[in-house]
Amino acid sequence: MNDLQQQIQEAIDGLVGSGAERGLQVAVYQNGEPVVDAVAGVADHETGRPVAPETPFYCYSVGKGATSTVAHVLVERGLFGYDTPVVELWPEFGANGKETATVRHVLTHTVGVPGIPPDTTPEDLCDWQKMCEAIADAEPWWEPGTKIAYHAYPFGYIVGEIVRRATGKPISQVLREEVAAPLGIADEIYFGVPESELGRLARLEDAEGSAEYLASLPDDAPFFKLGPRQVTPTAEFGNRADILMADIPAGGKMSARAVARMYAALLGEVDGVRLVSEERLREIFVGAFTGVDQIMGFPTTWALGYSLGRIGADPQESQSVFGIGGVGGSFACADTATGVAWALTKNRLTPDFGAAEKISGIVAKAAA
Protein backbone atom coordinates (compact mmCIF):
# COMPACT_ATOMS: atom_id res chain seq x y z
CA MET A 1 0.00 0.00 0.00
CA ASN A 2 3.08 2.21 -0.38
CA ASP A 3 1.74 4.42 -3.16
CA LEU A 4 -1.82 4.50 -1.79
CA GLN A 5 -1.36 8.00 -0.33
CA GLN A 6 -0.49 9.34 -3.79
CA GLN A 7 -3.33 7.46 -5.51
CA ILE A 8 -5.92 8.78 -3.06
CA GLN A 9 -4.51 12.31 -3.09
CA GLU A 10 -4.79 12.36 -6.88
CA ALA A 11 -8.34 10.99 -6.70
CA ILE A 12 -9.63 13.58 -4.24
CA ASP A 13 -7.76 16.42 -5.97
CA GLY A 14 -9.57 15.33 -9.13
CA LEU A 15 -12.96 15.33 -7.41
CA VAL A 16 -12.41 18.86 -6.13
CA GLY A 17 -10.86 20.05 -9.39
CA SER A 18 -13.83 18.79 -11.41
CA GLY A 19 -16.24 20.75 -9.22
CA ALA A 20 -17.94 17.56 -8.01
CA GLU A 21 -16.74 18.08 -4.43
CA ARG A 22 -15.76 21.08 -2.30
CA GLY A 23 -13.68 19.69 0.57
CA LEU A 24 -12.60 16.14 1.39
CA GLN A 25 -10.59 14.10 3.85
CA VAL A 26 -9.55 10.47 3.46
CA ALA A 27 -7.73 8.40 6.08
CA VAL A 28 -6.69 4.76 5.87
CA TYR A 29 -5.28 2.47 8.56
CA GLN A 30 -3.93 -1.04 8.06
CA ASN A 31 -3.17 -3.34 10.98
CA GLY A 32 -3.35 -0.38 13.37
CA GLU A 33 -0.95 1.83 11.42
CA PRO A 34 -1.90 5.00 9.49
CA VAL A 35 -1.10 4.61 5.78
CA VAL A 36 -3.11 7.50 4.27
CA ASP A 37 -4.01 10.95 5.61
CA ALA A 38 -5.08 13.05 2.64
CA VAL A 39 -7.09 16.27 2.31
CA ALA A 40 -8.28 18.40 -0.60
CA GLY A 41 -10.30 21.54 -1.16
CA VAL A 42 -11.83 24.01 1.26
CA ALA A 43 -13.64 23.55 4.55
CA ASP A 44 -15.65 26.76 4.11
CA HIS A 45 -16.66 27.89 0.64
CA GLU A 46 -17.48 31.38 1.92
CA THR A 47 -14.10 32.16 3.49
CA GLY A 48 -11.87 29.82 1.51
CA ARG A 49 -10.53 28.20 4.70
CA PRO A 50 -8.72 25.05 3.54
CA VAL A 51 -9.46 21.56 4.81
CA ALA A 52 -6.90 20.39 7.38
CA PRO A 53 -6.44 16.79 8.59
CA GLU A 54 -7.93 17.76 11.97
CA THR A 55 -11.01 19.57 10.57
CA PRO A 56 -14.22 17.95 11.91
CA PHE A 57 -17.05 17.41 9.41
CA TYR A 58 -20.69 16.84 10.29
CA CYS A 59 -21.00 13.42 8.66
CA TYR A 60 -24.54 12.67 9.75
CA SER A 61 -25.07 8.90 10.21
CA VAL A 62 -21.38 8.03 9.99
CA GLY A 63 -21.65 9.01 13.66
CA LYS A 64 -23.82 5.96 14.34
CA GLY A 65 -20.60 3.95 14.07
CA ALA A 66 -19.25 5.88 17.06
CA THR A 67 -22.56 5.46 18.93
CA SER A 68 -22.42 1.70 18.41
CA THR A 69 -18.75 1.58 19.37
CA VAL A 70 -19.51 3.27 22.71
CA ALA A 71 -22.16 0.59 23.36
CA HIS A 72 -19.71 -2.24 22.56
CA VAL A 73 -17.05 -0.78 24.86
CA LEU A 74 -19.59 -0.72 27.70
CA VAL A 75 -20.70 -4.29 26.94
CA GLU A 76 -17.03 -5.25 27.08
CA ARG A 77 -16.85 -3.61 30.52
CA GLY A 78 -19.88 -5.59 31.70
CA LEU A 79 -22.26 -2.65 32.21
CA PHE A 80 -24.95 -4.41 30.16
CA GLY A 81 -25.24 -7.16 27.55
CA TYR A 82 -26.68 -7.37 24.06
CA ASP A 83 -29.64 -9.36 25.37
CA THR A 84 -30.24 -7.08 28.36
CA PRO A 85 -33.86 -5.83 28.20
CA VAL A 86 -33.86 -2.07 27.69
CA VAL A 87 -36.36 -1.73 30.56
CA GLU A 88 -33.74 -3.02 33.02
CA LEU A 89 -31.82 0.20 32.43
CA TRP A 90 -34.65 2.47 31.27
CA PRO A 91 -37.98 1.28 32.73
CA GLU A 92 -40.05 3.93 30.94
CA PHE A 93 -39.05 2.49 27.56
CA GLY A 94 -41.36 -0.49 28.07
CA ALA A 95 -44.51 1.59 27.49
CA ASN A 96 -47.07 0.48 24.90
CA GLY A 97 -45.70 -3.00 24.28
CA LYS A 98 -41.93 -2.46 24.09
CA GLU A 99 -41.07 -4.30 27.31
CA THR A 100 -39.46 -7.21 25.39
CA ALA A 101 -37.02 -4.93 23.53
CA THR A 102 -33.34 -5.69 24.09
CA VAL A 103 -30.09 -3.86 23.42
CA ARG A 104 -29.58 -6.25 20.47
CA HIS A 105 -32.90 -5.11 18.96
CA VAL A 106 -31.80 -1.49 19.29
CA LEU A 107 -28.43 -2.11 17.62
CA THR A 108 -30.03 -4.02 14.72
CA HIS A 109 -32.74 -1.42 14.01
CA THR A 110 -35.44 -3.98 14.86
CA VAL A 111 -36.74 -2.40 18.08
CA GLY A 112 -39.83 -1.09 16.26
CA VAL A 113 -39.82 2.70 16.75
CA PRO A 114 -38.09 4.02 13.60
CA GLY A 115 -39.98 7.32 13.47
CA ILE A 116 -40.19 10.47 15.57
CA PRO A 117 -43.27 12.66 16.09
CA PRO A 118 -44.19 14.45 12.83
CA ASP A 119 -44.18 17.84 14.57
CA THR A 120 -40.58 17.42 15.84
CA THR A 121 -38.54 20.61 15.34
CA PRO A 122 -34.76 21.15 15.26
CA GLU A 123 -35.09 22.68 18.72
CA ASP A 124 -36.80 19.50 19.94
CA LEU A 125 -33.89 17.40 18.68
CA CYS A 126 -31.61 19.42 20.97
CA ASP A 127 -33.82 18.62 23.99
CA TRP A 128 -32.54 15.24 25.20
CA GLN A 129 -35.24 14.62 27.78
CA LYS A 130 -38.08 15.57 25.42
CA MET A 131 -36.85 13.25 22.65
CA CYS A 132 -36.26 10.33 25.02
CA GLU A 133 -39.71 10.73 26.55
CA ALA A 134 -41.34 10.80 23.11
CA ILE A 135 -39.49 7.67 21.97
CA ALA A 136 -40.12 5.82 25.25
CA ASP A 137 -43.83 6.59 24.98
CA ALA A 138 -44.07 5.56 21.31
CA GLU A 139 -46.14 2.58 20.23
CA PRO A 140 -43.97 0.08 18.35
CA TRP A 141 -44.73 -0.53 14.67
CA TRP A 142 -44.08 -4.25 15.23
CA GLU A 143 -43.08 -6.64 18.01
CA PRO A 144 -39.45 -5.81 18.87
CA GLY A 145 -37.00 -8.08 17.10
CA THR A 146 -39.37 -9.31 14.35
CA LYS A 147 -38.96 -6.71 11.57
CA ILE A 148 -36.44 -4.08 10.55
CA ALA A 149 -36.40 -0.41 9.49
CA TYR A 150 -33.62 2.11 9.70
CA HIS A 151 -34.10 4.07 12.96
CA ALA A 152 -32.60 7.29 11.59
CA TYR A 153 -33.06 9.50 14.65
CA PRO A 154 -34.33 7.14 17.41
CA PHE A 155 -31.23 4.91 17.19
CA GLY A 156 -29.02 7.63 18.67
CA TYR A 157 -31.36 8.62 21.47
CA ILE A 158 -32.11 5.03 22.50
CA VAL A 159 -28.46 3.93 22.57
CA GLY A 160 -27.53 7.25 24.17
CA GLU A 161 -30.11 6.90 26.95
CA ILE A 162 -29.06 3.29 27.60
CA VAL A 163 -25.50 4.60 27.96
CA ARG A 164 -26.62 7.44 30.23
CA ARG A 165 -28.65 5.13 32.46
CA ALA A 166 -25.76 2.65 32.70
CA THR A 167 -22.99 5.19 33.38
CA GLY A 168 -24.73 8.30 34.73
CA LYS A 169 -23.00 10.32 31.99
CA PRO A 170 -24.16 11.76 28.64
CA ILE A 171 -22.95 9.74 25.67
CA SER A 172 -20.76 12.66 24.47
CA GLN A 173 -18.76 12.38 27.69
CA VAL A 174 -18.51 8.59 27.44
CA LEU A 175 -17.35 8.84 23.82
CA ARG A 176 -14.64 11.25 24.90
CA GLU A 177 -13.50 9.34 27.98
CA GLU A 178 -13.75 5.74 26.78
CA VAL A 179 -12.99 5.97 23.06
CA ALA A 180 -11.62 9.30 21.86
CA ALA A 181 -9.17 10.25 24.64
CA PRO A 182 -7.43 6.84 24.81
CA LEU A 183 -6.95 7.01 21.03
CA GLY A 184 -5.70 10.61 21.05
CA ILE A 185 -8.63 11.93 18.98
CA ALA A 186 -10.67 13.72 21.67
CA ASP A 187 -10.64 16.98 19.67
CA GLU A 188 -11.61 15.36 16.37
CA ILE A 189 -14.71 13.25 17.10
CA TYR A 190 -17.87 14.51 18.79
CA PHE A 191 -21.60 14.15 19.09
CA GLY A 192 -22.12 17.59 20.62
CA VAL A 193 -19.35 20.02 19.68
CA PRO A 194 -18.21 22.49 22.38
CA GLU A 195 -19.09 26.06 21.44
CA SER A 196 -15.40 27.00 21.51
CA GLU A 197 -14.70 24.47 18.72
CA LEU A 198 -17.47 25.45 16.27
CA GLY A 199 -15.13 27.61 14.19
CA ARG A 200 -13.02 24.55 13.33
CA LEU A 201 -15.83 22.65 11.64
CA ALA A 202 -16.24 22.32 7.90
CA ARG A 203 -19.23 24.21 6.53
CA LEU A 204 -21.77 22.06 4.72
CA GLU A 205 -23.31 22.93 1.37
CA ASP A 206 -26.00 21.19 -0.67
CA ALA A 207 -25.05 19.70 -4.03
CA GLU A 208 -26.75 21.39 -6.96
CA GLY A 209 -30.37 20.28 -7.25
CA SER A 210 -30.52 18.35 -3.95
CA ALA A 211 -32.53 20.98 -2.06
CA GLU A 212 -34.93 21.27 -4.99
CA TYR A 213 -35.32 17.50 -5.10
CA LEU A 214 -36.22 17.36 -1.38
CA ALA A 215 -38.67 20.22 -1.84
CA SER A 216 -40.38 18.28 -4.64
CA LEU A 217 -41.05 15.23 -2.48
CA PRO A 218 -44.58 14.94 -1.08
CA ASP A 219 -44.99 15.12 2.69
CA ASP A 220 -46.04 11.45 2.78
CA ALA A 221 -42.90 10.24 0.95
CA PRO A 222 -41.21 7.28 2.73
CA PHE A 223 -38.10 9.44 3.24
CA PHE A 224 -40.00 11.74 5.61
CA LYS A 225 -41.05 8.78 7.78
CA LEU A 226 -37.39 8.66 8.84
CA GLY A 227 -37.70 12.25 10.05
CA PRO A 228 -40.14 15.04 9.15
CA ARG A 229 -39.26 17.65 6.55
CA GLN A 230 -38.28 20.29 9.13
CA VAL A 231 -35.45 18.09 10.49
CA THR A 232 -34.23 16.71 7.16
CA PRO A 233 -30.40 16.65 7.12
CA THR A 234 -29.65 19.45 4.68
CA ALA A 235 -26.69 21.85 4.74
CA GLU A 236 -28.77 24.60 6.36
CA PHE A 237 -29.85 22.21 9.11
CA GLY A 238 -26.34 20.84 9.61
CA ASN A 239 -24.72 24.27 9.87
CA ARG A 240 -26.96 25.37 12.76
CA ALA A 241 -24.95 26.03 15.91
CA ASP A 242 -27.60 24.47 18.18
CA ILE A 243 -27.64 21.26 16.14
CA LEU A 244 -23.83 21.10 16.05
CA MET A 245 -23.57 21.61 19.82
CA ALA A 246 -26.34 19.17 20.77
CA ASP A 247 -25.99 15.52 21.71
CA ILE A 248 -27.75 13.93 18.72
CA PRO A 249 -25.95 10.56 18.50
CA ALA A 250 -27.80 9.55 15.34
CA GLY A 251 -25.00 11.57 13.72
CA GLY A 252 -21.53 12.78 14.51
CA LYS A 253 -18.97 15.48 13.81
CA MET A 254 -15.53 14.07 13.07
CA SER A 255 -12.38 14.05 10.99
CA ALA A 256 -11.72 11.14 8.66
CA ARG A 257 -8.57 10.19 10.53
CA ALA A 258 -10.42 10.12 13.86
CA VAL A 259 -13.17 7.77 12.73
CA ALA A 260 -10.75 5.60 10.74
CA ARG A 261 -8.59 5.32 13.87
CA MET A 262 -11.65 4.30 15.89
CA TYR A 263 -12.50 1.52 13.41
CA ALA A 264 -8.85 0.43 13.38
CA ALA A 265 -9.00 0.10 17.18
CA LEU A 266 -12.05 -2.16 16.83
CA LEU A 267 -10.07 -4.43 14.50
CA GLY A 268 -6.97 -4.56 16.69
CA GLU A 269 -4.42 -2.52 18.61
CA VAL A 270 -3.66 1.09 17.74
CA ASP A 271 -0.71 2.43 19.71
CA GLY A 272 -1.46 -0.03 22.49
CA VAL A 273 -5.21 0.70 22.59
CA ARG A 274 -7.76 -1.94 21.65
CA LEU A 275 -11.43 -1.06 22.11
CA VAL A 276 -12.88 -4.58 22.20
CA SER A 277 -11.58 -8.14 22.46
CA GLU A 278 -11.18 -10.44 19.44
CA GLU A 279 -14.11 -12.49 20.72
CA ARG A 280 -16.29 -9.38 20.94
CA LEU A 281 -15.25 -8.28 17.45
CA ARG A 282 -16.36 -11.64 16.01
CA GLU A 283 -19.79 -11.10 17.55
CA ILE A 284 -20.05 -7.46 16.45
CA PHE A 285 -19.58 -7.77 12.70
CA VAL A 286 -21.63 -10.89 11.92
CA GLY A 287 -25.00 -10.31 10.26
CA ALA A 288 -27.51 -10.19 13.10
CA PHE A 289 -30.74 -9.45 11.22
CA THR A 290 -31.79 -9.57 7.58
CA GLY A 291 -35.15 -8.39 6.28
CA VAL A 292 -36.99 -5.89 4.13
CA ASP A 293 -36.77 -2.33 5.45
CA GLN A 294 -40.31 -1.46 6.53
CA ILE A 295 -39.95 2.17 5.44
CA MET A 296 -37.76 2.13 2.33
CA GLY A 297 -38.78 -1.30 1.01
CA PHE A 298 -35.36 -2.74 0.16
CA PRO A 299 -33.65 -5.83 1.63
CA THR A 300 -31.15 -4.96 4.34
CA THR A 301 -28.75 -6.73 6.70
CA TRP A 302 -27.39 -5.27 9.92
CA ALA A 303 -24.64 -6.38 12.22
CA LEU A 304 -24.68 -5.05 15.79
CA GLY A 305 -24.84 -1.34 15.02
CA TYR A 306 -23.17 -1.35 11.60
CA SER A 307 -24.24 -2.14 8.05
CA LEU A 308 -22.45 -4.96 6.25
CA GLY A 309 -20.71 -5.09 2.87
CA ARG A 310 -18.22 -2.99 0.93
CA ILE A 311 -19.73 0.10 -0.61
CA GLY A 312 -20.08 -0.30 -4.37
CA ALA A 313 -19.71 -4.10 -4.14
CA ASP A 314 -22.08 -7.03 -3.69
CA PRO A 315 -22.75 -7.12 0.06
CA GLN A 316 -22.86 -10.93 -0.03
CA GLU A 317 -19.29 -11.00 -1.36
CA SER A 318 -17.86 -8.57 1.18
CA GLN A 319 -19.38 -9.66 4.50
CA SER A 320 -16.07 -9.00 6.28
CA VAL A 321 -16.66 -5.23 5.89
CA PHE A 322 -18.70 -3.37 8.51
CA GLY A 323 -19.36 0.36 8.82
CA ILE A 324 -21.89 3.03 7.93
CA GLY A 325 -22.35 6.00 5.66
CA GLY A 326 -24.21 9.24 6.18
CA VAL A 327 -26.56 11.52 4.27
CA GLY A 328 -24.40 13.58 1.93
CA GLY A 329 -21.98 10.81 1.01
CA SER A 330 -19.43 10.48 3.84
CA PHE A 331 -18.51 6.91 4.77
CA ALA A 332 -16.35 4.91 7.20
CA CYS A 333 -15.75 1.20 7.66
CA ALA A 334 -13.41 -1.62 8.64
CA ASP A 335 -12.55 -4.93 6.96
CA THR A 336 -11.75 -7.86 9.24
CA ALA A 337 -10.30 -9.82 6.29
CA THR A 338 -7.62 -7.26 5.36
CA GLY A 339 -7.13 -5.36 8.63
CA VAL A 340 -7.96 -2.13 6.79
CA ALA A 341 -10.09 0.70 8.23
CA TRP A 342 -10.81 3.81 6.18
CA ALA A 343 -13.00 6.90 6.18
CA LEU A 344 -14.01 9.63 3.75
CA THR A 345 -15.53 12.86 5.04
CA LYS A 346 -16.83 15.70 2.87
CA ASN A 347 -18.83 18.88 3.09
CA ARG A 348 -20.80 18.91 -0.16
CA LEU A 349 -23.96 16.90 0.51
CA THR A 350 -24.48 14.73 -2.56
CA PRO A 351 -27.42 12.34 -3.05
CA ASP A 352 -25.06 9.39 -3.63
CA PHE A 353 -21.84 7.80 -2.39
CA GLY A 354 -19.90 8.30 -5.61
CA ALA A 355 -16.77 9.68 -3.95
CA ALA A 356 -16.79 6.95 -1.28
CA GLU A 357 -17.23 4.23 -3.90
CA LYS A 358 -14.23 5.59 -5.79
CA ILE A 359 -12.05 5.56 -2.67
CA SER A 360 -13.39 2.14 -1.65
CA GLY A 361 -12.31 0.69 -4.98
CA ILE A 362 -8.80 2.15 -4.69
CA VAL A 363 -8.39 0.89 -1.12
CA ALA A 364 -9.73 -2.59 -1.89
CA LYS A 365 -7.38 -2.98 -4.87
CA ALA A 366 -4.40 -1.90 -2.79
CA ALA A 367 -5.30 -4.27 0.05
CA ALA A 368 -5.88 -7.28 -2.21
Image: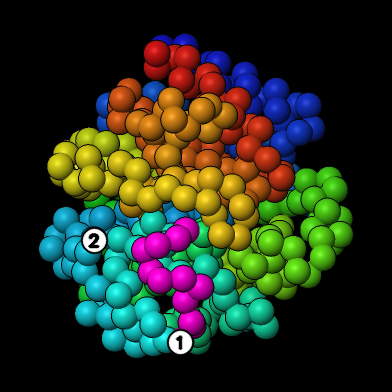
**Of marks 1 and 2, which one's residue comes earlier in the chain?**
2
Q: Is residue 271 visible?
A: no
Q: Which residues are magenta?
A: 137-148
Magenta residues, dominant SS class: loop
Q: Residue 108 location in percent, x, y?
A: 39, 56
Q: Quadrant of residue 295?
A: bottom right
Residue drawn at x 29%, y 65% as measured from the top left: 103
Q: Is residue 209 visible?
A: yes
Quickly name the residue at label 1: 137
| Pick the front one: 112 or 58 | 112
- How far apart are the alpha carbons under marks 1 and 2? 22 Å
How busy is the neighbourhood of tag 1: few (under 14 within 10 Å), some, or many (20 plus)? some
Residue drawn at x 43%, y 25% as measured from the top left: 317
| Pick the front one: 40 or 357 | 357
Give above or below for 330 relative to 356: below
Q: Is residue 282 left or right of residue 16?
A: left
Q: Residue 259 location in percent, x, y?
A: 42, 44
How busy is the neighbourhood of tag 2: few (under 14 within 10 Å), some, or many (20 plus)? some
